[in-house]
Amino acid sequence: MKHAIRAALAAFLLFALPVLRAETVDINHASAEEIAAALKGVGLKRAQAIVAWREAHGPFPSVEALTQVKGIGPATVERNRQRIRLDTPPAEAAQ
């Protein structure tokens, strides 16, 4: 019985925990494919628009700045707030 409980716990830890932990994405460096895979309600077209905006305007200074991208509104930002990272190196942000 103890062995069965341990096996069940091991299976849970192996398969369920990665699903429970939300994937995060650095929107200042990720590819469109990575952004689309990580953010809820953001498909490849919107993710490509995020990358295009970033290439034209530089790194996003805040999560809220995503709303400047056509098709990304406040609801999309709020739904994904815990998934979004802004890993901008200090030298890049100062430019």
Image: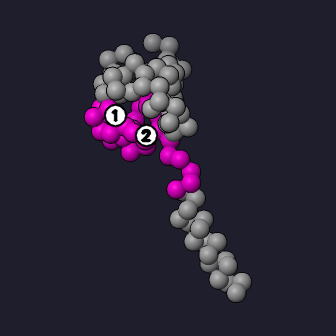
* 12 drawn magenta: no
Which contiguous range is marked in magenta? 19-48
Q: Residue at x 39, y 27 (%)?
A: 72
Q: Helix, strand or loop at disc 1?
A: helix
Q: Residue at x 32, y 39 (%)?
A: 43
Measured in 3D between alpha carbons, the distance from the residue under mark 1 to the one under mark 2, in whole angstroms, is 9 Å
Q: Earlier in the sequence, mark 1 or mark 2?
A: 2
Residue 81 visible within the image: yes
Residue 55 against residue 40 in the figure, above or below:
above
Q: Helix, strand or loop at disc 2?
A: loop
Residue 7 against residue 31 in the figure, above or below:
below
Give the total of numbered labels.
2
Q: Identify the mark at residue 47; answer none if there is no mark.
A: 1
Instruction: Please identify the residue farthest to the right as the structure is shown.
Output: 2
The amino acid type found where label 1 is placed reads Ala
* 33 drawn magenta: yes
Instruction: Please identify the residue farthest to the top as the structure is shown.
Output: 95
Residue 2 against residue 16 in the figure, above or below:
below
Where residue 73 appears, as percent x and y from the top left, is 42, 25
Judge from the rendering whether residue 1 lies leftward or rightward of residue 93; answer left or right. Answer: right
Q: Residue at x 32, y 17 (%)?
A: 56
